[in-house]
Image: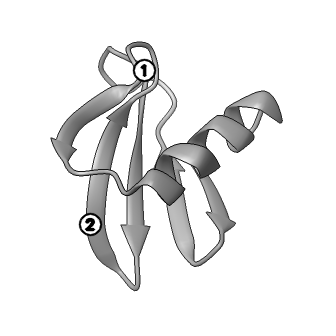
Amino acid sequence: MGKVRRAGYVFVTWKGDHTPRHVHVYRDGKFIVKWDLENQRPMKGEAPRRVVELIGELESEGRL
């Protein structure tokens, strides 16, 4: 499992999780979105623009 905290959000990934490659995002312990990293779209929930920006930053840093 990988967990990254950024800007009040928690981004969680699990090694060996099902495809497509994705990240679960939480804020204050509440689920926000399950984001498909391969197709750049939500799988469940809705992603605020700021979350999409943070996911892009984390991917470019190699953290997701």
User: Which disc number belongs to residue 6?
Assistant: none
The residue at the point 78 percent across, 29 percent down is: 60
Find disc 2 in the rendering and name its residue.
31
52 horizontally vs 54: left or right: left
Packing grade of label 2 (10 A; few <14, some 14-19, many >=20) is some
The extreme front residue here reads 49
Amino acid on which the number 1 mark rests in the picture: Arg
Residue 1 in sight: no
In this view, the residue in front, 64 or 60, is 60
Is disc 1 in contact with disc 2, using a CB cutoff of under 8 Å?
A: no
Find disc 1 in the rendering and name its residue.
21
The residue at the point 30 percent across, 20 percent down is: 18
Position in image of residue 4 (x %, y %)? 65, 58
The residue at the point 44 percent across, 52 percent down is: 49
Q: Is residue 42 above or below residue 53?
A: above
Q: Is residue 48 above or below residue 28?
A: above
Give me the C-alpha separation between circle 1 and circle 2: 18 Å
Instruction: Count every numbered label the image shows and give the total.
Output: 2
In this view, the residue in front, 21 or 9, is 9
Q: Which quarter of the figure has residue 22?
A: top left
In this view, the residue in front, 27 or 52, is 52
Q: Is residue 17 above or below residue 33?
A: above
Nearest to N terminus: mark 1 or mark 2: 1
